[in-house]
Image (tube, rainbow, N blue to C red):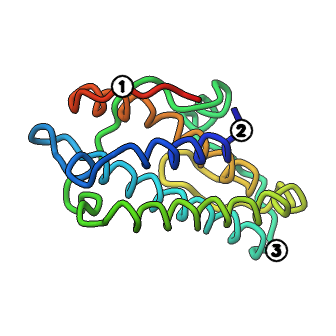
Amino acid sequence: MSDLKLIETYNKFLHDYSLEQLKRIPEHGVWSIGQMYDHLIVVAHEYLDSVESCAKTGGEQKLGKTEFGEYLFNIGGFPPIKIKIPDDTPPDNSKSKDDIMLELNHLIKRMRELEMKVDDINPNYKVKHGGFGLLNAQEWFSLVGMHFRHHLRQKYELDQKLGIKQIFS
């Protein structure tokens, strides 16, 4: 499944949630579905900002990824582990379903626009990721899909806690 198709599938799933389901935090330390969507959208835009930064740098970087960054790209995605991020700024849990849909649609539009340009960006123009090292525009772009795929497990776990069964269509 392409990255854009995956994000469009998340958008389809969003239609089936009530506002209460989106905002419900099933237990302490666990995000709501709305917070998960917010996290995915915010991080995707950060990754796409880095794609655009690679296009603007104009300077070549010979250095590359960290050992974990190499591993991540060699396996084609995040390992099946839960990654804890700092609790100091949890994702937003106040957005309406319509707000999230608009944000997802904006993300899809931005990805479509960048998808047409990303292969033309010099692969030696790189921007540093805090954990993965220096990544080029193509790698930053592919991280968006990797990140959405990684959160599918979380989505299914949250759906189970809410008693929701969804099937890809």
Residue bearing the label numbered 2:
2
Residue 1 x/y as whole percent: 69, 32
Q: Nearer the viewer, mark 3 or mark 1?
A: 1
At numbered mark 1, what does the secondary structure look like: helix, strand or loop?
Answer: loop
Tag 1: amino acid: Lys
Indicate left or right for 1 with 24 as reference: right
Distance from Cα at disc 2 to Cα at disc 1:
23 Å
Q: Residue furthest left?
A: 28
Q: Residues within 10 Å of mark 2 (few under 14, many from 20)?
A: few
Q: Are marks 3 and 1 in contact (CB under 8 Å)?
A: no
Q: What number of labels is visible?
A: 3
CA neighbours of label 1 inside 10 A, class few (<14), some (14 to 19), many (20+): few
Drawn side of residue 137 relative to residue 13, left or right: right
Q: Is residue 106 above or below residue 64?
A: below
Query: Which residue is found at the position 73% from the left and 66% from the top?
Result: 54
The residue identified by callout 1 is: 165
Return the disc, 3 or 1, that comes first in the chain's sequence.
3
- Against 42, residue 156 (above or below) is above
Residue at position x 40%, y 68% from top?
99
